[in-house]
Image (cartoon, helix red, strand yellow):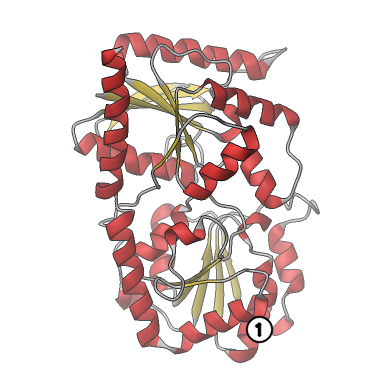
């Protein structure tokens, strides 16, 4: 079986920046190869063209082309031609692409197309409460309606996406996965009184709610250090740096305890997770967040949001706490309870890793993906 992943991102030093989408594809692709599946990854929208093989995965890095007119259409048709040429020469069994901005709109591929919902632009705009560009909605709807098969990383994302685009096709749900051997507990590195947020510093991740929450935590636990590890972005509503907005809202005494660590390498992020006493992830908009899986796999005590997808991943009071990020006092109280209760932290962390191991590890999830792909290939052979 030969699977091709079309993606705008992938975590590799010779490829542009990548987030959770790229990480989820890498986790799946790496494990599929170990199970004997041939994998090709086509990364579009890059700065230069390249073809290479690494870790038994073939990469086609495709430079972003510019056109004087209708670039959004012509680049997609260029990718269609490129993919169909590869379909013939490499004998792909199927192509999988994400839903983000309708990357496969206007394409007619020679093999079945699977679109996996990691959260479309329309999906995140709805959760954020902001308007979406009409062309992005059009591209995403066109792409989804043209797909042969639909996948989603969570039931919540499947239901929201179906409603947004009035989709009639069946949607299979297979969560993101994590390599539990790569993200292992490192309890000897934990430092007392260290609260970590990691991920993009952006409104939709709930970081602005942490202003009031941290003021409350500091009042009860003045020795606490607060770490933000991730890239700062300009806020979509105010046009101001999100980091600046956070600092403006913090009490003066709290500002001295807040540290921003931007653009850390992936390995350094793992080090920060290991050092954290408590990890906070108060997001308003996710599909199946890799950051949550990573922290859980490393046996960290977590306080997350309680929205939609959270119930499919976390169990409140068992793997950590799920709290509405706007309930600042309750959120702060949960952080405080974990800061002062070491046995409780350890218990929740152990239970978090156990849940990830049983339900979200690469071994478990890759098997589900492989069975899904085989069903497509077998049905294709019969037809």
Tag 1, which secondary structure?
helix
Q: Is residue 50 above or below residue 155?
A: above
Q: Residue at x 61, y 69 (%)?
A: 324
Q: Residue at x 27, y 35 (%)?
A: 370
Q: Is residue 273 above or below residue 94?
A: below
Q: Give the image quarter of residue 332.
A: bottom right
Task: State the quadrant of the C terminus.
Answer: top left
Q: Is residue 4 visible?
A: yes
**Label 1 crowd (10 A; few <14 / some 14-19 / many >=20):** many
Name the residue that disc number 1 marks. 216
| Left-right relation of 44 to 326 | left
Q: Residue at x 68, y 62 (%)?
A: 243
Between residues 298 and 46, which one lies in front from this camera angle?
298
The picture places residue 341, in percent across and down from the top left corner, at 42, 88
Q: Give the image quarter of residue 109.
A: top left
| Left-right relation of 234 to 47 | right
Q: Residue at x 44, y 76 (%)?
A: 317
The picture places residue 117, in percent across and down from the top left corner, at 50, 38
Between residues 30 and 263, which one lies in front from this camera angle?
30
The picture places residue 306, in percent across and down from the top left corner, at 55, 65
| Left-right relation of 211 to 175 | right
Between residues 94 and 255, which one lies in front from this camera angle?
94
Residue at the far right: name it: 238
| Left-right relation of 368 to 315 | left
The count of marks equals 1
Q: Give the image quarter of residue 76.
A: top right
Task: State the quadrant of the N terminus.
Answer: top left
Q: Is residue 268 visible?
A: no
The picture places residue 37, in percent across and down from the top left corner, at 23, 30
């Amino acid at each position: 079986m030969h699977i091709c992943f079309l993606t705008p991102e992938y975590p590799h030093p010779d490829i542009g920046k990548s987030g959770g989408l790229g990480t989820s594809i890498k986790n799946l692709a790496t494990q599929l190869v170990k199970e004997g599946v041939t994998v090709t990854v086509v990364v579009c929208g890059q700065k230069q063209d390249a073809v290479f093989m690494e870790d038994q995965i073939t990469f086609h890095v495709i430079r972003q082309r510019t056109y004087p007119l209708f670039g959004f259409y012509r680049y997609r048709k260029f990718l269609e031609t490129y993919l169909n040429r590869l379909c013939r020469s490499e004998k792909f069994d199927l192509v999988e692409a994400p839903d983000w901005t309708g990357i496969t709109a206007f394409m007619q591929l020679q093999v079945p197309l699977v679109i996996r919902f990691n959260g479309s632009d329309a999906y995140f705009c709805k959760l954020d409460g902001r308007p979406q560009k009409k062309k992005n909605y059009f591209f995403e709807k066109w792409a989804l309606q043209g797909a042969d098969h639909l996948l989603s990383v969570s039931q919540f994302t499947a239901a929201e996406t179906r409603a947004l685009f009035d989709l009639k096709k069946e949607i299979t749900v297979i969560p993101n996965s994590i390599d539990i051997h790569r993200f292992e507990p490192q309890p000897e590195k934990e430092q007392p009184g260290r609260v970590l947020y990691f991920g993009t510093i952006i409104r939709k991740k709930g970081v602005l709610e942490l202003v009031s929450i941290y003021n409350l935590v500091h009042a009860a636990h003045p020795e606490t250090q607060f770490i933000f590890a991730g890239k700062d972005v300009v806020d979509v509503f105010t046009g101001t740096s999100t980091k600046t907005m956070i600092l403006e809202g913090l009490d003066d005494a709290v500002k001295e305890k807040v540290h921003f660590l931007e653009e850390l390498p992936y390995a350094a992020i793992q080090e920060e997770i290991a050092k954290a006493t408590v990890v906070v992830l108060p997001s308003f908009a996710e599909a199946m967040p890799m950051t949550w899986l990573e922290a859980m796999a490393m046996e960290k005590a977590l306080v997350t949001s309680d929205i939609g997808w959270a119930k499919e991943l976390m169990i409140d009071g068992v793997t950590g706490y799920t709290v509405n990020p706007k309930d600042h006092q309750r959120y702060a109280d949960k952080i405080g309870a974990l800061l002062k209760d070491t046995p409780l932290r350890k218990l929740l962390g152990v239970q978090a890793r156990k849940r990830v191991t049983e339900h979200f590890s690469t071994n478990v999830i890759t098997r589900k993906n492989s069975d899904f792909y085989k069903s497509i290939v077998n049905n294709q052979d019969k037809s």
